[in-house]
Image (spheres, rainbow, N blue to C red):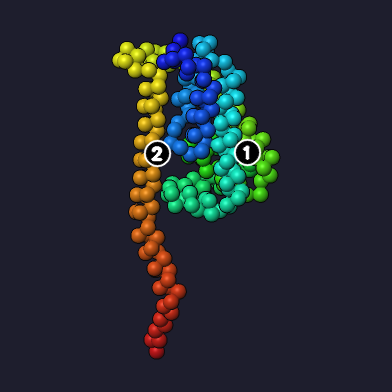
Amino acid sequence: MVEFPSSAVSTWGGVFVFVNVLLTRLGLPIPAVPVLLFAGSAIAAGTLSFWPILFAAVLGALIGDGTWFAAGRIYGRRLIAALGRISPAIDSRVDKARALFERFGVALVSISKFVPGLGLITPPLMGTTAVDSRIYALWDLAGALMWATFWLLGGAAAERQLHMLLAFVKARGGTVLDILLAAALAYLVYRLQQRRRERRRLADAAPAAASQATLAGWRRITPPKVLDAR
């Protein structure tokens, strides 16, 4: 059984899950999956109840996604451009999201929650389209339900393994919160490395793109030479 460090955590488990998922969906580098896994294991152990935790996770996801969707609807492509200036990786994600949108339509809202890198950019991108907000909300609700249920049931199925991990950490003076903090730190490092790789890729591609643009410009400016051999 996964034991939480205090009764307050299990008592306020729903609030903790809600805040964690909300901050994640708003774009903060805080992973929600580890929290949902441990919440699922606590559900399997009888410490927490499934439906309140599922409701908390889905509500946090809907509010976070809805905030980004509304921002996209208000500010349009300016918001996407601003996000691209903040993180170069956003541009490639936008291109990927657009390609998937052309293939799957508004169902991308649900699918994106299971595709790394697309979960955050899809709501504001959908806000810039002509998709009806009610249709968007229905697909977002379906996706949030599937996403939260998947990880909660995964945590319940892996309750024994998570208990062994927690026992290992507790034997060394740690708690489940230490595991979650370590996961958050690892996720932050991953995000920073991903951003650094994307910037390096863009920097490497810039000289080649500039050379091609210069060559194309000279071709347009310089008229072809015709040699008369007569």
Question: Which residue was labeled with disc 1?
Answer: 107
Q: Residue at x 37, y 12 (%)?
A: 167
Q: Is residue 102 visible?
A: no
* Mark 2, secondary structure of its residue: helix
Callout 1 amino acid: Ala
Residue at x 31%, y 15% (from the top left corner): 173
94 lies above or below 112: below
Residue at point 34%, 17% (across, down) = 174
With respect to residue 77, does 171 lie above or below?
above
Question: Which is nearer the eye, 86 or 102?
Answer: 86
Depth-wise, is mark 2 or mark 1 nearer the camera? 2
Q: Which quadrant, please, contains the C terminus?
A: bottom left
Residue at horizontal 61%, vertical 48%? 73
**2 and 1 marks in contact (CB < 8 Å):** no
Circle 1 Cα neighbour tier, 10 Å, few/some/many (<14 / 14–19 / ≥20):
some
Q: Position of residue 157 (x, y in %)?
A: 50, 16
Determine if residue 79 is in view.
yes
- Which circle marks residue 191 in the picture? 2
Could you say where residue 152 lies in the image, as x and y percent from the top left?
Answer: 53, 21
In the displayed image of the protein, which residue is found farthest to the bottom? 230
Compared with residue 99, is residue 25 higher up or lower down, i.e. above or below?
above
Nearer-the-camera pick, 228 or 83: 83
Percent position of residue 161, x then y? 42, 15
